[in-house]
Amino acid sequence: MTADLDAAVKHYNALADSYDRATRLINKTRLAAIARLAPRAGEIVVDAGCGTGFCLGPLREAVGASGVVIGFEPAAAMLHVARQRVAAAGWDNVYLMETDASVVRLSHRADAWLFSYTHDLLQSRSALSHLLGQGKTGARVAATGSKLFTPWLWPGNLWVQWRHRRYITDPKSLAAPWLTLSEFLEDQRIDAAPFAQHYLATGRVRPGLTDTPG
């Protein structure tokens, strides 16, 4: 575990009990990303950095009993909340792992990937290559998170950077957090309005990245 990841895990472990309540205002943004990802019945969908598992329910509803939802999260306390959520709902096709993106090994090849507020993960080319290489050919991707406003709205941008100071390690990348991910995608669509604090990026994993055909 790198120093940055170790610090992030400690921070998120401390936040676990209050995280769902503290982040409730972004639930609509999360659901919009899932809707754009458009999981289908019987598909295998990965929730990368699943946190406390808010997105697991909508994903599982979309893929149905014949599909599979896989979530992984390096912060044990966050994942504990997610596991409680899964157990309470009785989902036997939702699988959770305590691991990070750079080393995770999936039991199934993914049809679709969700990156919901996983800023630091999306800045790592090596982690993205490792992850997306475990998907099926043409796997779909949806990513959402925070970004800066238009540059001239600098007071707002200072607030965004301050607000995220303990959640991310590179505030400079807040200007366009999707850029590294874009290197791995085709058929991209980026929704990032100048006066909006959140973005939504979608696309398909470009050919040749996966190590075997889907």
Image (cartoon, rainbow, N blue to C red):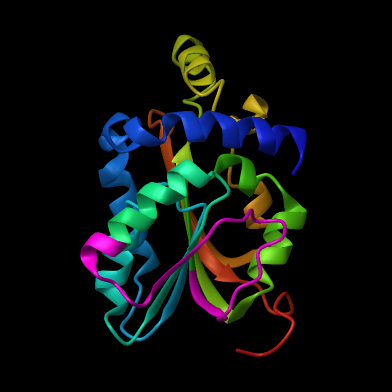
**Residue 189 within the segment the image draws in magenta:** no
Report the side of 80 relative to 65 (left or right).
right
**In this rendering, position of residue 15 left or right of residue 54:** right
List the single residue furthest toward the top. Answer: 155
Q: Looking at the image, is 61 positioned above or below residue 81?
A: below
Q: Where is residue 44 in the image (x, y as percent from the top left)?
A: 45, 79
Q: Quadrant of the N terminus?
A: top right
Q: Quadrant of residue 57?
A: bottom left
Q: Give the range drawn in magenta.
A: 87-112
Residue at left offset 61%, top offset 71%: 205
Determine which quarter of the picture holds residue 176.
top right
- The correct choice, above or below, for 135 with respect to 87 in the image is below
Q: Where is residue 77 in the image (x, y as percent from the top left)?
A: 46, 42
Residue 69: x and y in percent read: 41, 71
48 above or below 38? above
Q: Is residue 150 left or right of residue 91?
A: right
Q: Is residue 51 visible?
A: yes
Question: Is 42 on the left or on the right of 107, as rendered?
Answer: left
Residue 191 can be seen, yes or no = no
Provide the major secondary structure of the magenta segment: loop
Position of 127 relative to 164 (above/below): below
